[in-house]
Amino acid sequence: MRHIISIKDFEKRDIEALLDRAEAIDAGTYDRHALDDRILGVLFFEPSTRTRMSFEAAMARLGGTSIDMGGVEASSVVKGETLADTIRVVSGYADAIVLRHPKEGAARLAAEFSSVPVLNAGDGAGQHPSQTLIDLYTIRQAMPLEGIDVGLLGDLRYGRTAHSLAYALTEFNVTLHTLAPQSLEMPPNVMEGLKDRGVEVVRHDDIEEFTASLDVMYVTRIQRERFPDTASYYAVASSYRVTPELLERAREQMIVLHPLPRVDEIDPGVDALPHARYFEQARNGIPIRMALLLGVIG
Ligand code: NCD
């Protein structure tokens, strides 16, 4: 049984094999009945649009079915059921579980109590491995993954997509650049982990110079829901914005990614520029999640 908990569990060749599989799926090469009698249990303890819907769509494209716990308020969670019990029960109903939870480490814990594979769809500020595979796939559609400059912009403290992507990129020979509001820098444990994996991290404080240094700009939303209070959120809200004027500084081939949803960190005027790839990125959720589901329950 294979759980998908953290991108750190993936080696370069696993990542490449998965991206290759997604590419074949994108080209139409897959068995529409591969998961005909399979059921995916969908457990989201936090809001989601893309991740939930694209997992369900991926399942449906392969002939499978999804069963959704629904919102936390509609489930036995409000009666005080523990995550461990919910997982034990749902693993008796489904062939795999996709879980999103506000607590870091929740997916790892769930895997201990599950008799079926668990796919981590985001655990607090921890990891979001399927999003990272989408990000890598979208980069690879535009340029080789080796030897590039990748810049992470925004909430690098609470942003799980930034943490996951940074770790994954250590498998490739990239230079990482960061730019974050002062209170939202990459946490020391992630910085240590990146250093241990031999990756150079260049910290910037000038957004124009940052922009000019990149092949890929990965923009993230300030993760408002993870702040201890509203005052600390408002202290950093709207502190950076990617605009068409800023992108005049960018390398011609630079691409802009964002896991979405965006709030105000990318000006809608950017959407029409050739740099903007975030809607393709969202679309890439389908082939990537199809490849993942085939890998764990195919
Ligand atoms: C992200 C998440 O949930 O971590 N969304 C997503 O899955 N595409 C990013 C975010 O919420 O900002």
Image (cartoon, rainbow, N blue to C red):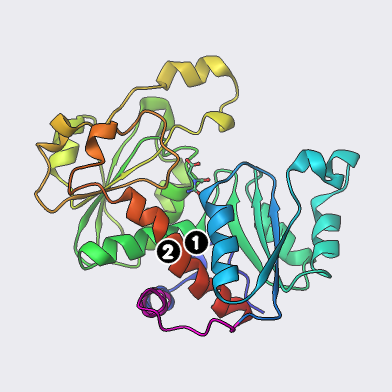
Q: Are marks 2 and 1 in contact (CB under 8 Å)?
A: yes
The residue under the point 78% across, 73% down is: 115
| Residue at the spot 10% in from the left edge and 37% down from the top edge | 249
Which residue was labeled with disc 1? Answer: 130
Question: Viewed as shown, does residue 187 lie left or right of 111?
Answer: left
Q: Is residue 264 left or right of residue 201?
A: right
- The residue range painted magenta reads 17-34
Q: Is residue 107 magenta?
A: no
Farthest right residue in view: 79
Kind of element beneath mark 1? helix
The x, y position of residue 13, in whole percent, is 39, 79
Q: Which amino acid is tagged 2?
A: Leu
Crowding at dot 2, Cα within 10 Å, few <14 / some 14-19 / many 20+, comes out as many
* x and y percentages locating residue 267 in the rendered image: 28, 31
164 w.r.t. 261: above or below: below
Q: Tally the numbered discs.
A: 2
- The image quadrant that residue 229 belongs to is top right
Q: Circle 2 sits on which residue?
A: 133
Quarter residue 46 falls in: top right
User: Label 1 is placed on what type of residue?
Assistant: Ser
